[in-house]
Amino acid sequence: MYTTFFGLTCNPFQLTPDPEFLFLGKDHKKALTYVTYGISAGTGFILVTGEVGTGKTTLLRKILKELNKDIKVARVNNTLVSSEQLIAMISDDFGIETQGKDKTRLLRELTDFIISQYAQGFRTTLIIDEAQNLSPELLEEVRLLSNLETDKNKLLQIILAGQPELKQTLAVPKLRQLRQRISISCHINPLGRDEIEEYIFHRLGIAGNRSAVTFLEGAVDLLHDATHGVPRLINIFCDFLLLAAFSEGTKKISVDLVKEIAQDLDSDTRYWKDIVPEKEQGIEPNVLKSVIMRLDAIESTMHGSFVSKADIEELAIKIAHLESSVGNAVEKTNLELQGKATHTSNIFLQKLLGETDALKKKLIELEQKQQLSAVESAGQKQRAFWSRIFD
């Protein structure tokens, strides 16, 4: 509608993940380098994470477009599936007939296909997008697929891409073997203030006119505050900005125009902030629930009249996992607090500190029990951890 007015050949802010429009910000450039190297070197698992709308899918499409022809790729986008459906989707994308076959036969034929491709000089790569939806059980099945290897080479390379929750899922004890096979891991953060301006002009340039608009003083700062640097939100916002500027017959983007669009989009609620019903606001974050359950399990074990050496070793492992879980909870909370209103942030932070302080006291009581003396070194490490977090 406005492309002719601004001298553009197409809509520069379309929401489709077109790799030609990929802007290589600092994190995107690093992720592109890491993943490209990982594929060329034939490393094991590659992990790519990032918040919703930061460009993970666009980056993967860019990489796929430039892959060597000797690499056969299967890509899975729908991850809300069962085990059998996942194997069928992988097989289907590799071009293997799946109709009327059970899981056992699907796995056998998928294995035969991967081996035959290697024998012909081809490599196979599996890309699973939106992998945060996979359960630990499905992720373990994916790991088992990677067991096909020679003395020097992996026959199937696997790339997992998803939102930050994927890292939390991978942190569970049963996925320790999978975690140890992740050779390359990179995270894509939202764009910074300086990157946003270059991002906008980059897309305008790809669409035919880098000088289509001029941002007046303060307009980009306000745009950064409204979108939090998330590329998908920037696209939505800028599409409306150009439409509004077109309707007013101007090619200058002012602070007032940005404010007007922000109000129209109601960006704080419609596009960015998740609204939690009042009745659900008192529920602890899932990570804290997991920590509390783990502590309860430790305490229950400690109440036993006899604790064997095996029990002691198990307790030491649980305590180590507890340290990792609480650390992840604190890190996750710090990330979630960015961009939230001060009042909301204070309430959330106070709740988290209250819960973790209670866990600290409970853990100290457990450490004082006589049965825990055999893991005193682990207890010292744990106390040092609490000291770093709270003191």
Image: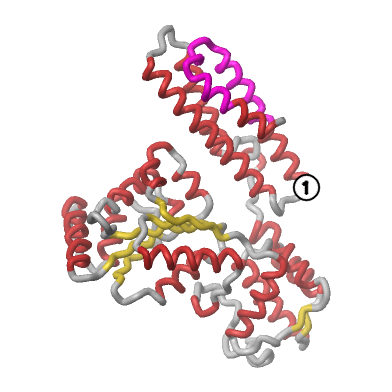
Q: In the picture, residue 265 is in which quadrant?
A: bottom right
Binning the other alpha carbons within 10 Å of mark 1 as few (below 14), some (14 to 19) or many (20 upward) gives few
Q: How many marks?
A: 1
**Between residues 65 and 263, which one lies in front from this camera angle?**
65
Give the residues drawn in magenta, as a range.
354-382
Direction from residue 220 to residue 150 in the image, left or right: left
Q: Secondary structure at mark 1?
A: helix
Query: Measuring 18% from the left and 66% from the top, which residue is drawn there?
Result: 119
Q: Quadrant of the N terminus?
A: bottom right
Residue 141, how many percent across, how many down?
A: 30, 48
Q: Residue at x 46, y 52 (%)?
A: 132
Find disc 1 in the rendering and name its residue: 342
Above or below, 289 against 170 in this view is above
For badge 1, the amino acid type reads: Thr
Q: How is the image coloured?
A: secondary structure
Task: Please tell me in which quadrant of the rendered image residue 121 appears.
Answer: bottom left
Taking the image as shown, residue 87 lies to the left or right of residue 189, namely left
Asked whether residue 370 is drawn in magenta, I would say: yes
Q: Quadrant of the C terminus?
A: top right
Q: Residue at x 62, y 80 (%)?
A: 202
Q: Return the x and y of residue 185 as percentages of the image width and height.
A: 48, 55
* Residue 93 pos. (x, y %): 29, 67
